[in-house]
Amino acid sequence: MTWANQTVVTEFILLGFSNFPQIQHLLFVVFLAAYVITLMGNILIILITTADPALHSPMYFFLRNLSCLEICFTSVIVPNLLANLLSENKTISFYGCMLQMYFFFFFGSTECFLLATMAYDRYVAICNPLRYTVVMNRRVCIQLAMTSWVSGIPVGTVQTSWLFSFPFCGPTEVNHFFCDSPPVLKLVCGDTYLFEMYAVTGTILIVLFPFILILASYVRIISTILRIPSAEGRRKTFSTCSSHLMVVTMFYSTASLTYFRPKSSYSPDTKKLLSLSYTVFTPMLNPIIYSLRNKEVKGALWRMLGWRLCSRQL
């Protein structure tokens, strides 16, 4: 395409689920409920792991970071999605779209590296338990958490600034419920070959590098667990990392299905459904998984509720 038809784009239209007008209100209720549960569940995890001294360990320090990250990540997408479901005006400003995409990549990249950090923490705890407190001291934990958060800055900055430096031609309809890179890229009029090569390479590195670290950690973890003589010992040891393993499986399975499928198999509606899984439902399920499958968190919750009840009675 030439740039002759280039126009000054000031806003985009997020089509979202407008092709299902009959269930717009039902979708609003479902997504609102998921968002409220996400906020309440993750805030509760942060409060419990902060208030209870028994949970002041590296594992729960990283869990607090994950809960904070999930709140931020889902808040970038869901409020705008809810507003669009109830409004006839489904526009988002040029810079609003740019910011949404930036924070989507920022928080998404951060989650990849934070999940890898949590896997490393479980590796040290299970494979080197005698050195755990020395290796995973407070300074190291803070450095690992900060590295995870900082890792998202260059990814979001380069990806977003490069994409929005291209000229856009009409129409400005984004066939998605948020400003993701592939549907916005379709609106560009210009040669995007280098950007597409960078985007594919960057996505592979950002997603696969942490995944390889997670995989290597769990290979060592499972190998260590299998050498434990008693079945009860193996069960208890595995239970300390089972919640994290479930979260990793959900996050990476949906992300890989979304971004590593051949272009020819892409379906906009299918991609929207897959995107919902890691932008809306996975952040909601994470605190449920960690609370229901973790005896220490459940114990801390009951202790906190018991303390509240006692305080009221006094």
Image (cartoon, helix red, strand yellow):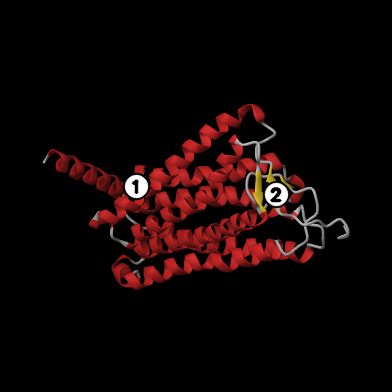
Q: Look at the picture and state if 313 lies above or below 110.
A: above
Between residue 167 and residue 144, name the one nearer to us. 167
Q: Is residue 219 visible from the viewing direction of this image?
A: no
**Looking at the image, is mark 2 or mark 1 nearer the viewer?**
2
Between residue 256 and residue 98, name the one nearer to us. 98
What's the amino acid at mark 1?
A: Leu
Q: Is residue 66 visible from the viewing direction of this image?
A: yes
Rendered location of residue 15, percent (x, y): 69, 41
Secondary structure at badge 2 equals strand
Q: Is residue 255 left or right of residue 172?
A: left
Residue tagged by mark 1? 44
Secondary structure at badge 1 equals helix
Rendered location of residue 302, percent (x, y): 24, 43
Q: Residue at x 82, y 63 (%)?
A: 191
Q: Look at the picture and state if 85 lies above or below 213.
A: above
Q: Is residue 212 left or right of residue 60?
A: right
Between residue 68 and residue 289, name the one nearer to us. 68
Rendered location of residue 201, percent (x, y): 68, 64
Q: Residue at x 59, y 54 (%)?
A: 100
Q: Quadrant of residue 199?
A: bottom right
Q: CA distance from mark 2 to mark 1?
A: 36 Å
Q: Which mark is first along the chain, 1 or 2?
A: 2
Residue tagged by mark 2? 12
Q: Look at the picture and state if 240 lies above or below 293.
A: below
Rendered location of residue 273, percent (x, y): 62, 40
Q: Residue furthest top?
A: 22
- Label 2: how many Cα within 10 Å (few below 14, some 14–19, many 20+): many
Name the disc covering residue 4, or none: none
- Label 1: how many Cα within 10 Å (few below 14, some 14–19, many 20+): some
- The image quadrant where one finds the N terminus is bottom right
